[in-house]
Amino acid sequence: MRTNSIAIQEISLYTAKDEICLKGRMQQGQLSYDTSVFISSTQLNRVINQLQKLNEEVDVSASFSSKCDYDGNLFMWLNTQDFNETSIPWDTFSLPQKQMLIRA
């Protein structure tokens, strides 16, 4: 079975648009290419947890840089070039079961 992985290069998020963008190098068997994907906050937490496991000497959450725009919205980014390991399995992004919306 072929294992797909992504070597994360950068994560950026902008609070005004609630967007989280992940940039990296996708590896699918012999094929390798640069990619950008938008992910959810749940997926971001999984990515941060994976990166933390791979880079125990670094506090991944504290490695984010931030800047405030003129409206007070926050732009945050993480550059992983100083990390020892950035390659995580692609299935990190899949959710184990379909999410349900529960309304009370």
Image (cartoon, rainbow, N blue to C red):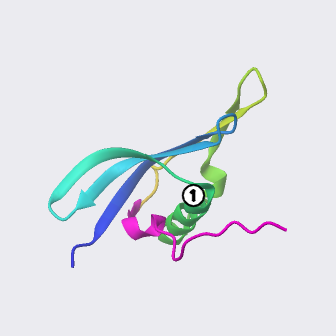
What's the amino acid at mark 1?
Leu
Locate residue 29, reporting x and y percent. 18, 65
Q: In this view, does 76 lie above or below 59?
A: above
Q: Quadrant of residue 52?
A: bottom right
**Residue 98 shown in magenta:** yes
**Mark 1 crowdedness (10 Å alpha carbons): few <14, some 14-19, many ≥20:** some
Q: Helix, strand or loop at disc 1? A: helix
Can residue 32 be seen in the rendering of this structure?
yes
Q: Is residue 1 above or below residue 64?
A: below
In the image, taking residue 10 as reference, residue 19 lies left or right, namely right
**Residue 72 shown in magenta:** no
* Residue 59 or residue 28, whichever sits in front: 28
Magenta region, mostly helix, strand or loop? loop
Determine the residue positioned at 51% across, 70% down.
Answer: 95
Locate residue 2, reporting x and y percent. 22, 73
Determine the residue positioned at 51% across, 68% down.
Answer: 50
Farthest residue toward the bottom? 1
Locate residue 53, reporting x and y percent. 52, 72
Q: How many labels does the image show?
A: 1
* Residue 26 or residue 96, whichever sits in front: 96
Q: Quadrant of residue 30?
A: bottom left
Locate residue 99, reporting x and y percent. 60, 69
Can residue 89 be seen in the rendering of this structure?
no
| Residue for badge 1 | 44
Give the magenta-colored segment's residue range: 86-104
Q: Quadrant of the N terminus?
A: bottom left
Determine the residue positioned at 41% across, 59% down.
Answer: 86
Determine the residue positioned at 79% across, 66% down.
Answer: 103
